Amino acid sequence: MQRTNILKLLPAAVLFALFGVMPPGTAKAQGIIAQQTVTLEVLELNKIGINRNALTLIIQEADVQAGVPLPVTNSDGALFWMTNGENKKITVASSNAAPRFNLTLMAVDVEQSAGLSLPEIPLNDAQTKDFIIGVTRAVGRCQIRYTASTQVSAGTGRETYVITYTITGS
Amino acid sequence: MLAPTVQPGLTFPSFTRSLMVLLLLGGTHLFEMVQAQTTGNHTVTITVATITAVQVSSGSVSMSITGAGVAAGQDLMTVSDQSTNLLWGINSANRKITVSTSLGSQTFSLRVVAISPTQGIAAPEVTLSTVANDFLLSVGRSSGSCGIGYTGLALASQGTGSDSHSITFTVQSE
């Protein structure tokens, strides 16, 4: 290994000693210094993730005097994001275009300067809606607070929603 | 100088003895003359000058943070490169190799460390700056190579962009 290396350097050393120049090539080298150009490029990156793949809300109590089932909330889900771009927002969309029950959500405990939470958002259709806005060069985290409610007239049953969060340009 | 003539008063045997002595003396002198012509000496001096050569295997390295390995909620993004080598040949004692960058104002951080040097001791990983930092120690009187390990670091708050460094490796006295 050493022999190979010194053999590689020998022509360069001889040329340098005789003429003060180094041989042409991709590698720049001089007697006691060697130079290299290093380019570090950072592209725009947007990442978003969630900590729970499945959440369940069960409405099982009612306010007898008011005559309505009591809403239930769940804040077990957390959302994480990262962007080095500017003027981004996080949107939310439900796969359930015509739900029988009511489901709303809101971002709570958004980290400071990581974005701005919007008021309670009803997932009563399949439209994409703003969830967190003002996300610029930030790493953030929030809890997702779901609230499920229903009317007596809606009866009983089970509904499944696939909720999609997207970080996108404003 | 000595003619082989018979002198009056000398008997033949004594003449013969004288001739033999003369031939013997003459032959010895001749042998010494021949011997002086086939030998000689001169002084050979070898001077080994200071040789210090250092070279990189490639003049350029490109690194890009594209999102591979980046996780949501994590601020730090990194990219690594170990595609190039540094080679050196040094016949002076007590030498080290330092590293510095020409880029004074950097958007992102760039770290470098010597990987598996065949000679010498790798210095701890350093963040590149315009001030020379130790890269490889105790490389005097050796030839060898090492990998050049670069790590680029970026934070989300630093946004996007590109830094172009001219990295200089310098052999110095320890």
Image (spheres, coloured by chain):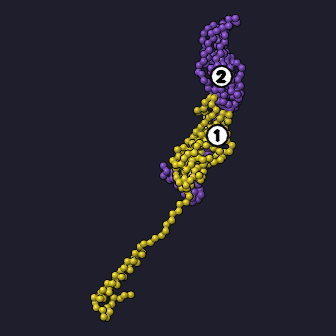
Chain colours: A purple, B yellow
Q: Amino acid at mark 2?
A: Gln
**Amino acid of disc 1:** Ser
Residue A105 lies in what quarter of the image?
Answer: top right
What's the distance in space between the residues labelled 2 and 1, CA to CA?
A: 32 Å
Give the residue displayed 65% in from the left and 22% down from the top: A143
Residue A64 in the figure: left or right of residue B143: right
Residue A17 percent across, percent down from the top left: 57, 58
Q: Chain of mark 2?
A: A
Residue wearing tag 2: A143
Vertical order, B62 against B95 (above or below): above
Relative to residue A59, is residue B52 depicted above or below?
A: below
Q: Tell me if residue A89 can be seen.
A: no
Q: Residues within 10 Å of mark 1 (few under 14, many from 20)?
A: some
Residue B100: % across, % down = 63, 47
Same chain, labels 2 and 1: no
| x and y percentages locating residue B109 in the rendered image | 64, 40
Q: Which residue is mark 1?
A: B109
Secondary structure, mark 2, is strand
Q: Secondary structure at mark 1?
A: strand
**In the rendered image, which quarter is residue A16 located in?**
bottom right
Q: Residue at x 63, y 44 (%)?
A: B128
Chain letter for the residue marked with disc 1 in the picture: B
Tag 2: Cα neighbours inside 10 Å, few (<14), some, or many (≥20)? many
Farthest residue in the bottom direction?
A: B8
Image quarter (top left, top right, bottom left or bottom right) of the N terminus of chain B: bottom left
Q: Residue at 63% of width from left, 16% of height from top?
A: A96
Q: How many marks?
A: 2
Say above or below: B162 vs A79: below
Q: Between A125 and B25, which is closer to the camera in this rendering?
A: B25
Q: Which mark is residue B62?
A: none
Q: Nearer the viewer, residue A61 or A162?
A: A61
